[in-house]
Amino acid sequence: MGMAIRRLGLLIGLLIFLGMTYLTGCTSTSQTTSSSSSSSYLYYDTHSHLQPSESGGVLSFTGGADVAVASMNAWGVKKILVMPPPFSSSSEQTATRYECTDMSAAVSKYSDRIALLCGGGSLNIMIQNAVSGQSINSANFKTVARQLADTTGFVGFGELAAEHFCLGSGHIYMMAPPDHPLFYALVDVASEKAVPIDLHMEAISSTMSFPTLTSGSCSYNPAVLTPNIDKFKNLLTYAGAKSPKVKIVWVHAGWDNTSQRSTTVCDELLGLYDNLYMNLKHSSADSVSANQVLDSSGNIKSEWLSLFNKYPTRIMMGADHFFAPAGTTPPGPGSFDSSWAIITKLATASSNLAVKIGYENAQTIYSLQ
């Protein structure tokens, strides 16, 4: 019954959305590919993950990709951007670390449905090691970044972490000042390649005690958190001064564990920095409710709708879902269906915003076909 209701809601939204798109001449040849498997779909999810299976020490991502494409088809999603999550050199993550280059078989199988962001399994580790006191040569760091940019299917760098909480088993706490010299080095390479950087950062406006998490406690998390918004502004200023400007995508808008990533904070930063972008995630199971996009009835909150209307070209979808192979359990709560419910609601409220947030902005920001 739940699946039937979801499909009905999506169908109603899509009919309104597609009808308005046709009437306003919004469709274009860039929304189709040479493969009939995606030619009828419109949307782009700019932040997802593939959970690997392991056999004999070899990781495979094709099973997760198969599940991802089935979910994409159900929601009318044409393409997803997948990436390694931000890893560290911690022994807790040794067996599970990987980089975008390990996903080549999955990308080859679904070249018209999957694109890559790179760096979470290598560049992020180098940044974390530097924060821990290791000497990391900036030139070597840039060399690794440039090599990743040559990966087939590459469209940007991610997922990098400036403030990442441990939310449970397999997670670990990570912190790196957003204005760390290696983040600046990555901006230099991103400008060379004219690609965005995806940044994971819990919002911390002032020194605070570590919050109580809805997902439970984790011993890796510190007792006190230090502010990062001003340092984030430094990064945005540096990235905005490059030629071309580097787009910084502050991921997981609507998903918040400090109660400080409000629409007010998002509005302030979007207003100050025209190279700042965001993608939307909705997961009520592991996020404080106050700053979620949807209310308890599943409707878009007025403050978020106002933000969308104020910055219609700066926000995208990015569910942050981990697609695991069939028959296996993905880590953490699912967030693909719950996040894409935002577009179902938005399509009935504003066809123009649904077009922009659902796919046009992603096409522009990541230069997608």
Image (cartoon, rainbow, N blue to C red):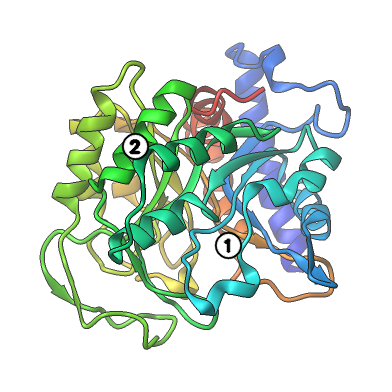
In the figure, is residue 60 to the left or right of 274?
right
Q: How many marks?
A: 2
Q: Position of residue 227 (x, y in %)?
A: 15, 61
Instruction: Classify 110 as above or below 230.
Output: above
Q: Which residue occupies the foreground of this view, 40 or 3?
A: 40
In this view, the residue in front, 41 or 210, is 210
- Across and down, in percent, residue 161 comes to 39, 56
**Which residue shows up at 58% across the image and 62% down it?**
335
* Residue at mark 2: 185
Instruction: Answer with the quarter of the image where residue 249 lies.
Output: top left
The residue shown at (35%, 33%) is 187
Location of the N terminus by quadrant is bottom right
C-alpha span from label 2 to label 1: 32 Å
Where 45 falls versus 40 (above or below)?
below
From the top left corner, tell me how far across and down residue 327 is, in percent: 84, 74
The label shown at residue 61 is none
Q: Which residue is depicted at the point 66% across and 51% down?
A: 9
Residue wearing tag 1: 335
Mark 2 falls on what kind of element?
helix
Mark 2 surroundings: few (<14), some (14-19) or many (≥20) residues within 10 A = some
Q: Is residue 56 left or right of residue 51?
A: right
Q: Tell me residue 137's x, y (percent).
A: 36, 45
Judge depth for marks 2 and 1 and give the one in front. Answer: 2
Residue 242 visible within the image: yes
Callout 1: helix, strand or loop? loop
Query: Could you tell me the amino acid type at mark 2?
Result: Ala
Residue farthest along the right direction in this orientation? 36
Instruction: Say whether disc 2 or disc 1 marks the residue closer to the N-terminus.
Output: 2
Residue 313 appears in the rendering: no
Which one is in front, 289 or 318?
318
Q: Amino acid at mark 1?
A: Ser
